[in-house]
Image (cartoon, grey):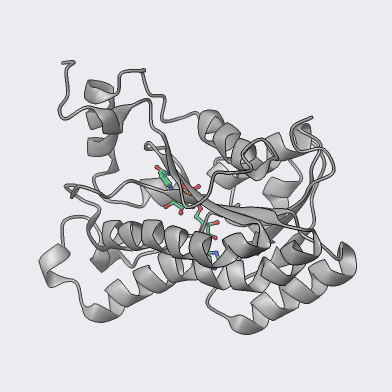
Amino acid sequence: MLLEGKKLVITGVVTDTSIAWHVARIAQEEGAEVVLTGFGRGMRLTERASKRLPSAADVLELDINDQSHMDALVADLESRWGVVDGALHAIAFAPQDALGGNFLNTPVESAVIAFQTSAFSYKTLAVGLAPLMRSAGGGALVTLDFDNSQAWPIYDWMGVAKSALQSVTRYLARDLGVDRIRVNAVSAGPLSTIAAKSIPGFQSLEKAWLQRSPIEWDSSDPTPVAQMVALLLSDWTPMTTGEVVHVDGGFHSLAAGFRE
Ligand SMILES: NC(=O)c1ccc[n+]([C@@H]2O[C@H](COP(=O)([O-])OP(=O)(O)OC[C@H]3O[C@@H](n4cnc5c(N)ncnc54)[C@H](O)[C@@H]3O)[C@@H](O)[C@H]2O)c1
């Protein structure tokens, strides 16, 4: 099996629609041992979603902006496993006034929250888990990106944060390669999760995909994205790091829509 015996930390599960839930599902199906992290009032939802996995996983609390949570998570993993082989960073948040076409009026505080929670947090997770990955002789980190190399109608400061996240991926890859820790990003097409539905005008992205992606995109199916995450967490990509892999039906490779 692809992930036989791997010990993985999966952040970002709220419900069984979360991309991270599908990563946890596939990871278990492929032989991994998984711990989930939950956040604030969403903890109970994460615990409920965990019970729908092939085997229920423990849920540990992690507000990525609270260093005491990160320290407690690392201490738990240290006594539980002693090592960590990989982790998924599936964390993003932007206040409502940082999204939806309000770019020119967004206050700096909201843009900073989007950056800290959605981009800087990859560094927080990586630095926290790196010692446990070194103990494993190396490891793999994967984050979830939405490609912002061009501006979107509605994505605003979340888009700016995603551009930063791609850059954070490359700098982490630079600094952690010496420990054989690979750091990559999967750039997904639009998927109708809770986070996505809270973006005003999300449907305009779904429509753009219907018109442009060479392979027909299904925004209700996170499995292809989760499969790529599983591949990058596995031993089958030993020389891939600092990479942004698109799982978007090929949308990024065309300049314009070609279907009605
Ligand atoms: N849904 C899409 O269309 C899409 C496309 C590309 C990339 N992504 C990215 O995938 C990732 C997962 O999103 P999703 O669509 O599965 O939605 P989701 O709502 O299921 O997941 C978002 C997660 O972020 C977590 N989170 C927010 N603030 C946090 C904090 N301070 N500490 C810890 N966790 C925190 C939430 O608890 C939630 O689990 C996000 O980074 C998102 O930007 C989503």
Residue 42 visible to an observer of this rendering: no
Report x, y in % for residue 109. 29, 80
- For the point 52% across and 70% down, which residue is it? 123
Residue at the image point whose x is 67% and y is 63% from the top = 179
Residue sitting at x 37%, y 61%: 167
**Vertical order, 244 against 164 (above or below):** above
Could you tell me how many numbered marks the image carries?
Answer: 0
Front-most of residues 137 and 258: 137
| Quadrant position of residue 104 | bottom left
In the displayed structure image, the side of residue 159 where residue 123 appears, left or right: right
Q: Quadrant of residue 82?
A: bottom right
User: Image check: 85 left or right of 218?
Assistant: right
83 relative to 190, above or below: below
205, above or below 131, in the image: above
Q: Position of residue 61 (x, y in %)?
A: 68, 69
Q: Which residue is farthest front?
A: 178
Can residue 258 be seen? yes
- In the image, is residue 29 above or below residue 233? above
In the displayed structure, does residue 184 sit left or right of residue 49?
left
